[in-house]
Amino acid sequence: MNLLLAIPLAASVPVESAAEVVEAAGNIGFWEGLFLGAIQGVTEFIPVSSSGHLALGHMIWGRSSCDAERAFDVAVHAATLFAMVLYFRDDIVQLMKKRPRLIGLLILGCVPAGLVGLFFKKNMENLATNAWVVGGAFMVNGVFLLASRFFGIETKRLEDLRPSDSLLVGLAQAVAITPGISRSGMTITSSLICGLRRSEAFVFSFLLGMPIIAAATAYKLSSIGKLAVSDSWSGLAGGFVAAFFSGLVAVWILARLVRRRNLVPFGIYTLGLGLVVIGIKIAKAIWGG
C-alpha cells in the first residue's frame, strides 16, 4: 500500500499552504471524496488492494501524484484505522494485558515496510501513476490469492509465533507497498504459510497494519489539516465518513470469508481487473488513444 511510503516521504515534503496543497490537482469535490472513501473502506479489508483501487480512482479523475492526493489517501486510511480499532478492540485490550511478547513481534514485523519506504521511496512514489505497474500487480495479487487456498497447516496460535514468522509476514507487508498488491491478502496468506490458524492470521494481519497506518497519519497531519481547511474540505469529510462505515462492513465480511477458506473470489476479481487494466493500456498503445 502506498500509505507505507508516507512515513519516510512526509519527513522530506515541505509544509505548504492550503492553496498550494490543492493547487497541483484542483479541489477534491464531495462526490469524488465520497466515491474514493467508499473504495478505500471496502478494499482496505478485503484482499484486493486499497492502494491499487485508489490509484485507479485518481486516474479516473485525471489526477497526477501530488501532496493533496497523498494527504487524502492517508486521511481515508486513518478512517479505516478507526474502523479497525473499533472492530478489534477486544483483541487490542487483550494484547496490552496478556500478550506483551506479541507487541515485540508486531514491531519486528513493521520493520521491513519501513526500510523499503525509507531506502526506495524515490523509486516507489510514482508507481501509483503507472497503469502498467498497477495492472500487473493486480494480476500477481490474483494469482497469489488463488494459490492461498492450498497454503497453511493451521497448527499455531499467536502465542506460538516465532520472530522469523513475524519477519516473513512483515516482508509480505513490505511487498504490499506496490499498488495493486493487497496488504491483507499478502499478510494473511503469509501467516497461513507460517502455520497460523486462519482466525489468528486474520487478527495478526490487521494488528500488524495498525502501527503503520497510525504512524503515517501522524506524519501527514499537517497536510491533512491544510487540506481540511481548503476548498477540498467537503471531499475530505465525505471520504472519511464513507471509508469508516464501508470499512466496518468490509472487515465483518472478510472475517467470515477467511474462516471459510474462501479468498478465491477475490483472486479471480483482481486477476481479471489486472487483465482489463493491461488490456486497456495495450489497446491505447496500438490505436494511439
Image (cartoon, helix red, strand yellow):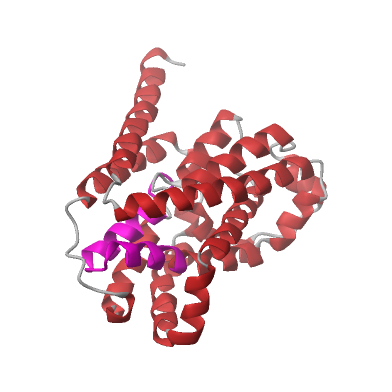
Against 58, residue 259 (above or below) is: below
Q: Where in the figure is residue 8, as x and y percent of width and height?
A: 55, 65
Helix, strand or loop: magenta stretch:
helix
Against 1, residue 207 (above or below) is: below
Q: Is residue 180 magenta?
A: yes
Against 58, residue 153 (above or below) is: below
| Residue lying at 69% horizontally and 32% vertically, measured from the top left | 31
| Residue lying at 39% horizontally and 29% vertically, measured from the top left | 277
Q: Where in the figure is residue 243, as x and y percent of width and height?
A: 60, 47
Q: Where in the figure is residue 83, as x and y percent of width and height?
A: 57, 57
Q: Where in the figure is residue 141, as x and y percent of width and height?
A: 32, 45
**Position of 247 compared to 24: left or right?**
left
Q: Can residue 254 be seen in this view?
A: yes
Q: Is residue 188 magenta?
A: yes
| Residue lying at 36% horizontally and 57% vertically, measured from the top left | 175
Q: Which of 31 and 110 is in front in this view?
A: 31
Residue numbers of the magenta segment: 178-207
Q: How many marks?
A: 0
Q: Nearer the viewer, residue 9 or 84?
A: 84
| Residue lying at 52% horizontally and 47% vertically, measured from the top left | 249
Q: Is residue 29 visible?
A: no
